[in-house]
Image (cartoon, rainbow, N blue to C red):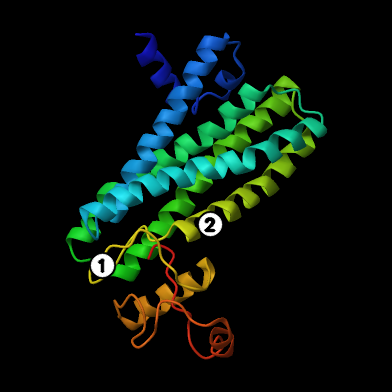
Amino acid sequence: MKRNGSLREVFSILQNVERYFEDRDTVQSNRLLFYQFLVICLFSMLYGMVMGSYHSFLQSLASGIKLMFLFLSSILICFPSFFVIQQVLGSKMSLRQMLFVVMSGLVLSSTIALSFSPIVILFQVTGGNYHFLQLLHVGIFVFSGIFGMRVMIEALKYACENKGIYPRIGVAIFRVWIIILAFVGIQIAWNLRPFLCNKDEEFKLFRQYEGNFYTAIVYSIQQLSSGSDDAQPQGRNEKFPPKQEVEQADQDSTVVNFFN
């Protein structure tokens, strides 16, 4: 029963910000953090598998593992700076309370993303355009990320206004930290690609395309508007010599895809 109670608390804490600041013993706190960690791993992996299922079972498995790694590594890299800055600003929140807040945001983001799986599967089954699916996944991540950010900000506001243990300026600083977290996540995802792979291509664990995420989005929009479903323009190699790439940057879109 205790295990079921802890698992329910992972989601109930999202609806009641006071639960972040309840007194818990070490065992209860560790159990709750463990279940938050478990939900993030499971839900992000399942959504990653849905993404990769567009190509093959092997791609589905690889995408699931990579997306789970993306969620966890982003927090692992960014949380220390968040904790240190808040302490410098005068925050009286404990390390566990800060972890509850940040992990809850990821729990909500991964849950919302997974809830869109039936919609993604529908477009895959009904022959959704490859580039449309790329943009759909980006939109889902942005949408779920906004809700995850919102629940974290609401918890910090409550700590500031009702508990008096969090500095008001910390809420503004946190918004900057969220932007940093987003850029870190994008950079990690760029190096882990592909998540979604074109059906006409062979399975590859990692890509070697030059470029960046932002040109990838522009390229996908161009391909979608032109009705093309090619993963890359004809006659291009996967990796360009740096000099040639610079010379042609203004004339031709770089062959880059965020999920491919």
Residue closest to the eye, 196 or 173: 196
Q: Say if 182 sits above or below 222 in the image.
A: above
| Residue at 44% across, 20% down | 9
Q: Is residue 121 visible?
A: yes
Precedes in sequence: disc 1 or disc 2: 2
Numbered disc 1: secondary structure: loop
Q: Position of residue 241 (x, y in %)?
A: 52, 83
| Residue at 34% across, 8% down | 1
Q: Say if 27 sits above or below 248 in the image.
A: above
Residue hosting label 2: 186
Residue closest to the eye, 22 or 45: 45
Residue closest to the eye, 133 or 233: 233
Foreground mark, 1 or 2, reads 1
Name the quadrant containing residue 168. top right
Q: Residue 202 shows which numbered tag?
A: 1
| Residue at 49% across, 59% down | 191
